[in-house]
Image (cartoon, rainbow, N blue to C red):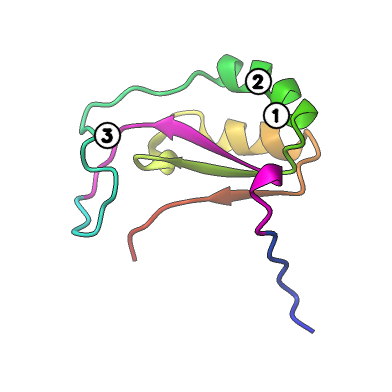
Amino acid sequence: MSKFRYDLNAKTVCTMLLTNECNVTCDFCVAEDFVSKNGCFVSLSDIESNIPIIKEGGGQFVTLSGGEPTLHPDFVDITKLLKGNDFGGVCVDNWFF
C-alpha cells in the first residue's frame, strides 16, 4: 500500500493564487499572460479572512500557486496559518524542475 494519498475530488481542493510575480521563464508556462516580474501579492489578512469561506464550502486541501508562490514575502506564515486551520494538506504548485 502506498504511503501517499491522492484526492482528486475537485470539490475539496482550493487553489490560492498568492501572486502573479514570477522569476523564471518556463517554456511550458500556461500562465505567461498572467505572470509579471514585478507582480502583486495577496495579503496575509485576505487569506486569513477567507479561510472560513473555504472551510464552509467543503475545502479540505489547499494548493498554493501563482506565478511563483514561494516569492510571497509571507510564504512561511501563510503555510503555518493554513496548517494551523486543520486543512488535510497544503501543497505548493510550482512547475520548474
Q: Magenta region: which residues?
A: 8-24
Q: Is residue 26 above or below residue 18?
A: below
Kind of residue sitting beneath label 1: Ile
The kind of residue tagged 2 is Asn
SS type, badge 1: helix
Secondary structure, mark 3, is: loop
Please state if 65 lies on the left or on the right of 80 as rendered: left
Q: Residue at x 46, y 22 (%)?
A: 42
In the rendered image, residue 18 lying in the magenta stretch gets the answer: yes
Q: Residues within 10 Å of mark 2 (few under 14, many from 20)?
A: few
Residue that numbered label 3 is attached to: 34
User: Which residue is at a point 24% across and 59% down the rendered structure image?
Assistant: 28
Q: Are marks 2 and 1 in contact (CB under 8 Å)?
A: yes
Q: Nearer the viewer, residue 90 or 70?
A: 90
Residue 4, compared with residue 92, is above or below; it is below
Q: Quadrant of residue 56?
A: top right
Q: Which mark is residue 91?
A: none
Q: What's the residue type where badge 3 is placed? A: Phe
Q: Residues within 10 Å of mark 3 (few under 14, many from 20)?
A: few
Which mark is on residue 54? 1
